[in-house]
Image (tube, helix red, strand yellow):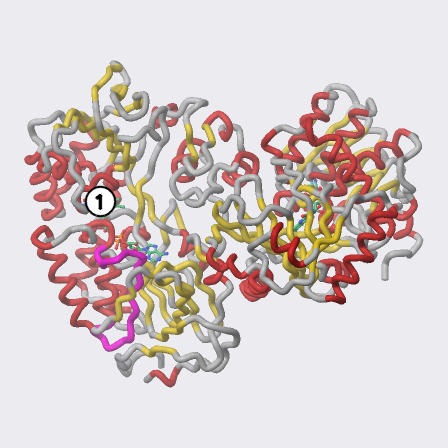
Amino acid sequence: MTGEYFTTGEYAGTDAEVVVADVAVIGAGPAGIAAAASAAERGLRVALLDRGLESGGQIWRHINGVAIPRVAQQWLARLDKSGAQILRRTSVVDVSVDVAGFEILAESSGRALHIRVTNIILATGAREMFIPFDGWTLPGVMGIGGAQALLKSGGSFAGKRVVIAGSGPLMLPVAAALAESGARLVLVAEQAKRSAVARFAAGLWRTPSTLMQAARYRARFMSSSYSTGTWVTAAHGSDRLESVTVTNGRRTWRETADVLCTGYGLIPNVELARLIGCETRDGAVVVDDDQRTTIANVQAVGEVTGIGGAPLSLIEGEIAGLTVGSRLSVPLPLLRRRATFEAAARRMFDVFAPRAELRALPTPTTIVCRCEDVTYGVVQDAVCARQAKLHTRAGMGPCQGRTCMPGLEFLLAWHSDTVRPPIEPALVSILSSEVAKNAPSSFLSNSCVGDVYQ
Amino acid sequence: MTQYPDAVVIGAGIVGAACAEALARAGLKVLILDASFAGGGTTAAGMGHLVVMDDSPPQLALTAYSARLWTTLAPELPRNVEHDACGTLWVAEDDEQLEAVRAKQRVYADHGIAAETLSPAQLADAEPHLRPGLAGALHVPGDGVVYPPTAALALLQRAIANGAELREGVRVDAVGAREVIVGNERIACDCVINAAGAHAPELTPGIPIVPRKGHLVITDRYPGFCRHQLVELGYLASAHTMTTESVAFNVQPRATGQLLIGSSRELVGWDMNINRAIVRKMLDRALDFMPSLALTSAIRTWTGFRPATPDKLPLIGAWEDTPGLWIAAGHEGLGITTSLGTGQLLADLVVGHEPALDPVPYAPSRVLAGIGTH
Ligand SMILES: Cc1cc2nc3c(=O)[nH]c(=O)nc-3n(C[C@H](O)[C@H](O)[C@H](O)COP(=O)(O)OP(=O)(O)OC[C@H]3O[C@@H](n4cnc5c(N)ncnc54)[C@H](O)[C@@H]3O)c2cc1C
Ligand SMILES: Cc1cc2nc3c(=O)[nH]c(=O)nc-3n(C[C@H](O)[C@H](O)[C@H](O)COP(=O)(O)OP(=O)(O)OC[C@H]3O[C@@H](n4cnc5c(N)ncnc54)[C@H](O)[C@@H]3O)c2cc1C
């Protein structure tokens, strides 16, 4: 099969560039990189799209030079050789379906890009979940992932008194990195119970690389205090953070701090999947053994299918890369490794689930929606996210509730609102763009392997 | 409510809210029922442009009357209703449309509605982001904008202050003579007001109301980008003809600094999905008038269903087939504006006061008599 498979004659309208490929992989984190490389190695024409400047996703993106882990180097080299075309600074804003396949609308450095494909692999990753509390909007309070990103891009915490409070395995590497960069770690407060964390750690022998990693991290900030069953209830300061209130449910105390890193684990970025119509369960995209979603020719890999860490993301990506557009069966060892990591991920999910006491964190005057300055007292009585939006503007700002709604869904047991295009803010010119009749389109150069699309 | 209500209003959209407010103010014991939550129906999707329109004399009478009521009420509305007396600019593309602008100005003058014609230079001065080469505009300073869901809430709050009760999440299954039926419960009352918007025919079969879908796009904040609600003169034609599909340039500055871009009309039943082709057409039309909108960032799109009647006029008054039943529905693309006039007119009819407008053109009996069902 060659480029002639696609015609652009059906388009009408003006401007916009067209790219045609067999597979679009959306998201260039570990999952997307593995999927794109494995699919392109099979001879498929693959476009790998990411809004970021560099490939690597949350975990690998910001690392420069020496700090890149060996597996990252290996995969990036494989991707480089695979022939996949990488489209950086390309934000997907919409996907529509027609008989010929999918049309992806993206904003690429301010220009409209239309990508026509027959298969989509969603690798949109996850973001941090925040639970609002008094003072969380003060300067000096940031996400745990945000602190990590700041470090990776050269930010300095040297000499700063830092409290890390939240939940999940992400706290460990960030604590280690902060300690190494010269921050004074006052407290690392994990909300999960000691017994649960211990059980989780004990189970890590089943995934040795993860256990080793955790041990290495812990060694690096051994001297500071790591407390389980402990959480921050408020942040204080006049114009920036000065101290935090900490509790373990029995005792409540103050800690002086210049920086508070907070976050209650990760939640999958399922907006694009939901826009396409893929079924989700417990906030993650439902997939089968071949990583196929409930929508034909759409697969999902990595954190968007449930939080499981980079090693699982890589395996899932590889499986999707092998199965996209074909009925090839997945090598057994790969399936076994996935099963092992999935079991660990499930345990993690249970261990680090936010405790019920956290539902009492926000007070009526706590700001919940930072875009629109809406307080908890104002949204508390709404019966659903949609009512809260319409009546109070919560979640109506530029971030469209990406930051506050997951926390509010946890606090108030709301269901998510519907997803509509654009899933990311997009220039009006992009939304109104159409592909010109006979527009010059760049066909990705790989030719297809014979067994695809029979 | 332990007491037996005088009136049950079905639907807590802006129309039901306005009816409840006027009835409660007239001293009736009012119960408002909504299947979902207040202001969550078409009211949640509307642009909230308070606009005088002259598609027909009764439309002009009802919109002008309502505009006066909004002006009186405005100072008493809470801030979150975001009332803004921004005025409307009806934009003319060419000399023919400018002629129509002048005719419109004469009609408005005859009805005591302030309006002035702007020259191309005055128009460019008033709205620098409009493209050059437009023929002029009609400026209607009395028009304004509200945020509809909170406007409905504010009206409901006033009703509640006068003794009304609001029950949300309560779907009415049927309406009988002086009663409404909710599951196993029968609520007896003196009168029932069907204000279920585009869903009104489900409770009162025979009402000729169909959902007329519309799309809107909202941008990020660009304070000062435009200062008036901008509507192309061709909008009137777009709203008037019951074609299967039309778009018109319609841009509104929100109190937040955001821009609301409309609007489209389609007859596609209750399909609430975004129609990308229509959104493109609508945005193209907007870009044609305001090219620099291209560089604003759109953050959200949505759709809503206007309750449309064949003769473009709402149904306000008694439904003679069922004793005690009144209709206040079918306000198409003007229900935010005409809610206040509707509430007052309906309350006057219910309690037997002399209404401020001739009720005949809006009387539901025109449907029973076969009029207005072309
Ligand atoms: C804030 C944060 C910090 C983390 N830190 C660590 C850590 O220190 N150690 C660790 O082991 N794990 C960490 N993780 C987890 C780790 O990132 C994941 O396990 C792993 O990266 C999963 O890979 P992924 O490919 O599924 O998603 P990601 O790596 O999240 O990649 C998803 C990619 O999709 C792109 N994307 C999403 N939507 C769109 C769109 N609409 N258009 C274009 N591009 C889009 C994003 O830009 C992103 O690059 C972190 C996760 C987060 C969210
Ligand atoms: C895109 C768009 C733009 C618009 N722009 C404007 C504008 O700029 N200016 C303007 O004046 N108008 C505008 N409109 C029109 C305006 O929004 C509507 O005319 C108005 O909202 C109708 O209000 P309503 O109360 O009749 O209906 P709704 O708001 O739909 O209220 C009806 C209520 O009845 C309830 N209900 C239905 N069935 C039952 C039942 N069986 N039991 C109990 N409750 C029930 C529903 O839950 C709902 O809350 C626009 C409309 C659209 C779609």
Give the main secondary structure, helix, strand or loop, of the magenta stretch: loop
Residue B78 higher or lower than B330, as above or below: above
Residue A193: % across, % down = 23, 27
Nearest to the observer: residue B359 or residue A276: B359
Q: Is residue A77 magenta-colored?
A: no
Q: Position of residue B71 (x, y in %)?
A: 74, 34
Question: Which region is colored magenta?
Answer: A40-56
At label 1, which amino acid type do we have?
Answer: Ala
Is the distance from the Cβ of mark 1 to the nearest ligand 1 atom less than 8 Å? Answer: yes
> Is B305 placed above or below B64 here?
below
Q: Mark 1 belongs to which subunit?
A: A
Reply yes or no: does residue A55 show up in magenta. yes
List the residue tagged with mark 1. A149
Whether residue B186 appears in this view of the structure is: no
Please tell me whether mark 1 sits on a helix, a strand or a loop.
helix
**Quadrant in which residue B151 is drawn:** top right
